[in-house]
Amino acid sequence: MAIQWFPGHMNKARKDITERLKEIDVVIELLDARLPASSANPMLARMAKGKPRLMILNKQDLADPAITQQWLAWYNAKPHTQALGMDAGERAPAQKLVAACRELAPNRGGLEKPLRVLICGIPNVGKSTLINSMSSRKIAKTGNMPGVTKNEQRIILADDFELFDTPGMLWPKIEVEEGGYNLAASGAVGRNAMDEEEVTLELLKYLLVHYAPELSARYKLDDVEGRQDWQVLEMIGRKRGAVLSGGRINMQKAAEIVLTDFRDGQVGRITLERPDEWLAWEKRAKAI
Ligand code: GDP
């Protein structure tokens, strides 16, 4: 089963964003640093074509730092694009974000016409956390402001800098199977839309290739080399007491343990995709 999931209000979000984009100088896309490509939105990229873009690799505290560097270099090499890593521990997120946007649109802004920036991101990527940490008392009431829909938030980050947050979201159409699993593992997909055991087996398969020492250390497993994903899930289930009557392993329970640990960063700082892997996955998906 591949993951296919669509949160509601997609069309409304698309309309709102298209409308807002007309006046926007820079588009910020918040990505999950553990799965930058899977959490990116190709539809947004098409809609914002030609606009300068700031890609924020958020939750970098959970991601593998060396791979985050690879992704930052990958995005920074694209035209009109800048990328930076961020997480909730960032001391001055607003300053960082404002500086990057000013650099991307040096000829825009000013007190007459502030620099206008739109921030987008898939659910659970940390958008509310980031906005709250930047705004405190600065959220403007938008209810009776012309040109700002009543659901929209406008956050004034500097005298000549406005950040727009359009509610509702664009969910990426999942074309790369691995991307669907990575989104599910990260916690972005609703629980009812996924089979946790299947998602965990895919996760373990990846961890066995790239993060076997971390996996062994977390679950005190001696010998994971050459093991299959399901064997490792059984080993974890046994270690953690996820055992049914008759001694069978409760694979569902074991899967929940692994997913929760992964999401909380308990297995270590892990990234589920690398630029070269992503290109290969994409190529294969297109060939099918
Ligand atoms: P939104 O759906 O994009 O608005 O996401 P939220 O801001 O509600 O965050 C989703 C979850 O991720 C919450 O449990 C946050 O505490 C957590 N979170 C947000 N930012 C970070 C971060 O930088 N690092 C870590 N480890 N967790 C984060």
Image: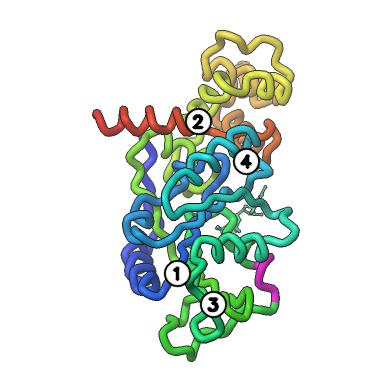
Q: Nearer the viewer, residue 51 or 235?
A: 51
Residue identified by numbered label 2: 197
- Element class at badge 3: strand
**Labels 1, 2: front one:** 1
Q: Is residue 191 visible?
A: no
Badge 3 local density, few (<14 within 10 Å), some, or many (20+)? many
Asked whether the residues under the numbered discs 3 and 1 touch, taking CB atoms below 8 Å apart as contact, a structural biologist would say no
- Which residue range is magenta in the image? 132-136
Residue 25's disc number? 1
Q: Where's residue 157, x and y in %?
A: 62, 74
- Quadrant hosting residue 50: bottom left
**Circle 2: residue type:** Glu
**Labels 1, 4: front one:** 1
Residues at marks 3 and 4, CA–CA distance in whole angstroms: 30 Å
Residues at marks 2 and 3, CA–CA distance in whole angstroms: 41 Å
Left or right: 246, with 185 as reference point: right
Magenta region includes residue 220: no
Residues at marks 1 and 4, CA–CA distance in whole angstroms: 34 Å
User: Looking at the image, is 77 positioned above or below residue 241?
Assistant: below
Quick one: label 1 or label 2, which is nearer the N terminus? 1
Left or right: 279, with 264 as reference point: left
**Circle 3: residue type:** Arg
User: Looking at the image, is 187 positioned above or below residue 130?
Assistant: above
Residue 154's disc number? 3
Q: Where's residue 243, x and y in %?
A: 64, 23
Quick one: label 3 or label 1, which is nearer the N terminus? 1
Residue identified by numbered label 4: 263
Asked whether the residues under the numbered discs 1 and 2 touch, taking CB atoms below 8 Å apart as contact, a structural biologist would say no
Badge 1 local density, few (<14 within 10 Å), some, or many (20+)? many
Q: Where's residue 139, x and y in %?
A: 61, 78
Q: Quadrant of ligand 1?
A: bottom right
